[in-house]
Image (spheres, helix red, strand yellow):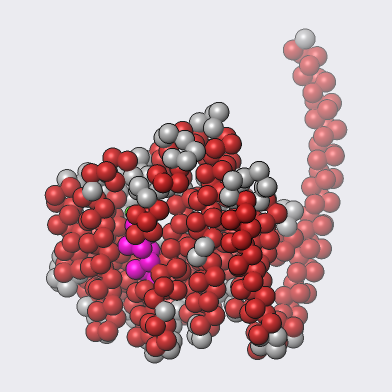
Amino acid sequence: MASAFIESAFYPSEIVALFHYKFLPASSSSALAKTLRTATKSKIRCYEFLNMTSRSFAAVIQELNDELRDAVCLFYLILRGLDTIEDDMSIPIDKKEVLLRNFHNNIYKRGWNFKESGPKEKDRQLLMEFDLVIEEFLSLKKCFQNVIAEKCKLMGHGMADFANNASYRNYGVKTVKDYDLYCHYVAGLVGLGLSDLFIGSGLENDELSEVPDLSKSMGLFLQKVNIIRDYLEDILQNRRFWPKEIWSQYVDNLADLKEPGHEKQAIECLSAMCLDALKHVPDCLTYMNMIRDPKIFNFCAIPQVMAIATLALVFKNYNIYKKVVKIRKGEAVKLIQKSTNIYAVVGIFRQYTQTIITKNDAKDPNFLRISIACGQIEQWCQTYLKSHPFSSATKTLTKSTPKQELNFIDAQLFILFIVFLLATICWIIKFFGLEWELLGKHLSFFTQ
Ligand code: CA
């Protein structure tokens, strides 16, 4: 956590956000703790697994209302189990295919678990104790069970189709169409399943089921940003998700992008990949604008704003070929705290789209297409703001509540504290600097 404060040293608003995050924990985590105090052993274990397997989703899932929270938690754990089998290269392909295609049946078998994961699989423990996940899955209401099992079936079959394809195994994803299909299986179906769970909880309107393409885009946007960001990690583990149809326009081998001498191609290929992800943004905004429940809104919006911030960060950023590139923790915390209504989320999307426009370069072959894609996002935002000039969201933003005033006072106090701290550090450095100078002279005397 200390490193997060140092990273955000030049961003006072992030320091304030981090301070709040660190010292004023969300009320919901204590609400969940209270629920878990009287919960079954298997449910407690499921939430432990959620925290162990997901860095980013655990926090947003825990904020949901009780009934929906359990359903989304189990949806996540079941798909994580399926994904662990898909990723495991120690399972022979014939066996893997059967496992993937039957996973949606296994989740109905009390006592089923899987103990043959490769030793390197980080989530192998989840599969070893999968009987506990099944126990909780079977205690969900029927309509939630049906949604989860149906999406699990489609995803398992989709993964099996790709795993069975020799060309995919050897060379990775081929065409942009294949890329979209793969992302649909592993993420689009999650978006569709979540919409169905929201409707099943009674908290969201049936109309979400009438816009499957929007639900799909929510998943595809997140997945594609992760695939772009994780280029290096994936290539080092011999996974190739960037479609050949795109990278072959720049290099002969996907792995060449990270090699010296290909910097220009690497940046241009990265632009093409970012452009492909940007296409989904207007759909995501339209979807989020349809959400009514504030907790579900938060749950949907937080990963989306993280994704647009990450996309703006990786765009034109050669570092993705050299190391892990991530947004600062302070920036992430600030985004989480801000994403409470569509008005704020539109503001965040505009801000990062502007960053992309500023970084866009006329010499890039995709310059014009990127400008158009950003223009479409900007147009969506403008249209929204014009049609909702006096929305309730706007009002809550302009009228400061007692809590906001308190935050403002906290912020002022905190900045004063930081100034005092910096002054003390400067004084210490100056004092010891002089001492060190003297010590240095003594040392150089002895070493001469
Ligand atoms: Ca996978």
At 47% from the left and 41% from the top, the residue drawn is 249
Q: Could you say which is closer to the camera, residue 6 or residue 270? A: 270
Ligand 1: quadrant of the figure: bottom left
Specify start and end residues of the magenta stretch as a single range: 182-191
Residue at 26% of width from left, 53% of height from top? 162
Q: Residue 189, can we see it? A: yes
> Which picture quadrant has residue 158?
bottom left
The quadrant of the image that shows the C terminus is top right
Secondary structure predominantly adopted by residues drawn in magenta: helix
Q: Is residue 66 visible?
A: no
How far across and how far down the image is residue 7, in percent?
Answer: 66, 51
Seen as rendered, the residue at the extreme top is 448
350 vs 280, left or right, is: right
- Residue 425 painted magenta: no
Residue plotted at (74% across, 72% down): 410
Residue 306, image x and y in percent?
A: 55, 62
Residue beneath the point at 65% across and 85% down? 387
Query: Residue 355: x, y in percent?
Result: 67, 57
Would you say 54 lies left or right of 287 here?
Answer: left
Answer left or right for 314 relative to 217.
right
Quadrant of the image occupied by residue 25: bottom right
Horizontal placement of 442 versus 213: left or right?
Answer: right
